[in-house]
Amino acid sequence: MDTLYRYILKPILFTIHPDTTHEMFAVMGEWAGSFFLLRSFFGLLYNYRGKDISKTVDGINYRTPILLSAGFDPGGKLVRIMPSFAFGGEEVGSITANPCKGNPRPHYWRLVRDRSFVVHKGLRNRGVGPLIARLKRTKRINDFVIGISIGRTNDTSASDVESGIADYLESFKKLNEANVGDYYTINISCPNAYGGETFTDPALLAELLPKLKQIKCEKPVYIKMPINLPWEQFSELLEIADKNNIQGVIIGNLNKNYDDLKYREDAPKEFSGGLSGTPCFALSNELIRKTREKYGKRFTIIGSGGIMSPEDAMEKFAAGADLVQLITGMIYEGPVLMKKICQRYAESLSGPTPK
Ligand SMILES: Cc1cc2nc3c(=O)[nH]c(=O)nc-3n(C[C@H](O)[C@H](O)[C@H](O)COP(=O)(O)O)c2cc1C
């Protein structure tokens, strides 16, 4: 199956614009997920069936410690097919209180030589209401964990601090009241939304989190962290998260620094966005390591950014991640990547156990 993807499917898919392939996958994945036979077929090819590698984090049991990262499935259409691909869960979203058209197209651009995407989607989604309705009517696959990422509506209606806070609170309250999702992530670090990353300013995060804390929530709440801040400012954000009962951090979001590209000339001239994949790898690992060093077990850490091989995933665990998330590696390496990571992780459990 590895060969089929690498030498036949991928070369074909990579001739199509990534905006189109992403939409094709959403439609086909939703369709395939509705048939038991197709779920079983993909499961046979791509699911992990080795020794038990399940892990309980913040009271949630993950069948495997690998999750699909936020952004691939903003509308929750793939929650029935993704369990066939060795994922222990997925983060749906980011969704926002109101529907967002997103930024003008194109939304994506492949940087093949850097094994990355330029992501310029700008939180395109149908809003929290339709997501709740969809998740409520979708029959869950037993042990597949669903996290929900909450962003801030990407237009002028939520661009100042007050309306931005109200926007996050509205989505959070609605999800919580509807009791959908197993954990929630507050995405403060979308690099291409209107008004910028307001709440990566420690003073403003310190306004948002106490208000969020006032809403009673039994589920773990995480923050999706930016990866381009100097450690001093990054750790100020962690201090604030610590004081406000945030259980964990996802480290982290897209890379804004085009100097981290080896082939900068491949980047599009007409638009810019955050970089996924390999350019995120070292930056996120470094921040995971420092966070674990400074805070010990205080935070759950979900490592995300540039996992393109089982070794990359193991490096994230070794740096201190409890769970890992990915998108770009799945697209460049094919769906067999997640199974290979599970196998490698299982082998590592026979030796020294990663945290
Ligand atoms: C197509 C795409 C869409 C994304 N959309 C979101 C999003 O809506 N919310 C979010 O928190 N992160 C989003 N991200 C960032 C990813 O969740 C992830 O943090 C980042 O891509 C690094 O992981 P990767 O290198 O495995 O792709 C997106 C990434 C990609 C590639």
Image: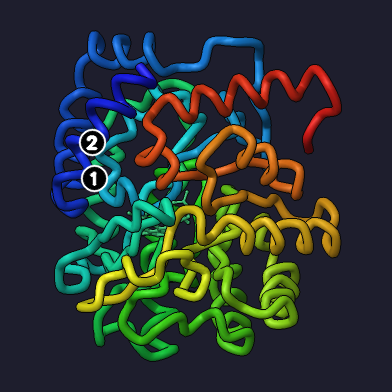
Q: Secondary structure at mark 1?
A: helix
Closer to us: 241 or 304: 304
What is the distance, in whole Å, between disc 1 and disc 2 at their CAs? 37 Å
Crowd around label 1: few <14 · some 14–19 · many ≥20 (10 Å): few
Q: Is residue 354 left or right of residue 285?
A: right
Which colour assignment does the render follow? rainbow
Q: Is residue 118 visible?
A: yes
- x, y (%) of residue 164? 39, 81
Q: Amino acid at mark 2?
A: Pro
Quarter placement of the N terminus: top left
* Residue that carries the numbered disc 2 in the rendered image: 11
98 shown above or below 149: below
* Along the line of sight, the residue nearer the viewer: 293 or 61: 293
- The reply to whether residue 97 is in sight is no
Residue depth check, mark 1 versus mark 2: number of the one nearer the observer = 2
Q: Residue at x 56, y 86 (%)?
A: 204
Residue at figure coordinates x 38%, y 21% from the top left: 2
Report which quarter residue 123 is drawn in. bottom left
Q: Is mark 1 within 8 Å of ligand 1?
A: no
The number of discs equals 2
The quarter of the image that holds ligand 1 is bottom left
Residue 309 relative to residue 114: left or right: right
Residue at x 45%, y 47% (from the top left corner): 69
Q: Which quarter of the figure has residue 235?
A: bottom right
Q: Earlier in the sequence, mark 1 or mark 2?
A: 2
Q: Amino acid at mark 1?
A: Ala
Rendered view: 250 above or below 208: above
Q: Position of residue 47 (x, y in %)?
A: 45, 17
Query: Considering only vertical position in the picture, is 268 above or below 136?
Result: below
For the C terminus, the quadrant is top right
Residue designated by label 1:
133
- The residue that appears at 25% across and 81% down in the rendered structure is 155
